[in-house]
Image (cartoon, rainbow, N blue to C red):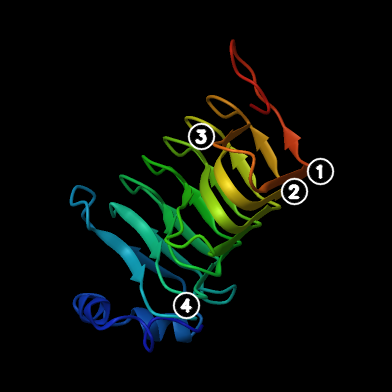
Amino acid sequence: AQVVNQAVDGKLIEQLRTPFAAVATDLALGRRVVLDRGDTSTTNSRGFEIKGHYIRLGDETGPLQIKGAYFGISLAGTGCQAHYCEVYSCSSNGITVTGSEILVQNCRVRDNAGRGVSVNPSSSSSAAAIRSNILENNGLCGLYANNYGGVVDVTNNLSLHNGEDGIRISQSGGTVILRNNTLSGNGLYGVRHERSDSAGQFNARNNILCTSGAGNACLY
């Protein structure tokens, strides 16, 4: 795996050395790693916080499970990726994206109290791709994306049985691509698209949207 022992910022490395000294070694050897942060009440508690650039967390041969944090994974750098991660039992969001050129792919994000994946870039030119993930049983929406200038690509995801919307988009610019996703059994809308002005593009195609209940809609 290409992960945590090189470009992660120094503070996080120190946290991982005690008591998680074997994490990087286990990932490099292709072992399944379960990282239980054991602190869901402290708001700065994170399973992983990646502030470096071009870091890949997890892969098919070295999957990573993260649980018991306030935020499961925080991707705050440029070009960072999360692959084959399972994030669950966190008291806020499973995966939080604030960096640029971020890829979250083949992850399962479930049973978190907040959002499954939250994309809230710090720059108007930031880009993010959320692809081929399972987002289920999270307390709020399966995926939230705030886009005001870059490109957010949401493709081939399953968003199921989340407490609020399957996917919620807040857009004031940029481009949002929503394709080949399946959304079912969520508490409010399948897709909620909020747009503050006429700028930007919203492209949705080949999605399966299912919902039920009074006042709910597949696309709102």
Residue most toward the top? 214
| Residue at horizontal 57 percent and vertical 29 percent from the top | 186
Residues tagged 1 and 2 counted as in contact (Cβ below 8 A): yes
Residue beneath disc 2:
179
Q: Earlier in the sequence, mark 4 or mark 3?
A: 4
Q: Indicate whether 59 appears above or below 84.
A: below
Name the front one of labels 4 and 2.
Answer: 2
Amino acid under disc 1: Asn
Are the two marked residues, 4 and 2, in contact with CB atoms closer than 8 angstroms?
Answer: no
Spatial CA distance of label 4 from label 3 is: 30 Å
Pick whichever of labels 3 and 1 is earlier in the sequence: 3
Alpha-carbon distance for marks 4 and 1? 36 Å
The residue beneath circle 3 is 162
Question: Can the viewer see residue 125 in this picture?
Answer: yes
The quarter of the rendered structure image containing the C terminus is top right
Q: CA distance from mark 1 to mark 2?
A: 6 Å
Query: Is there a contact, CB below 8 Å, between mark 3 and mark 1?
Result: no
Which secondary structure lies at badge 3? loop
User: Along the horizontal axis of the image, is 109 left or right of 90?
Assistant: right
Q: Which residue is mark 4?
A: 31
Q: Secondary structure at mark 2?
A: strand
Amino acid at circle 2:
Arg
Q: Give percent across and percent down for residue 97.
A: 45, 59
Q: Is residue 67 visible?
A: no
Residue ID for mark 1: 206
* Residue type highlighted by circle 4: Arg
- Circle 4 or circle 3, nearest the eye: 3
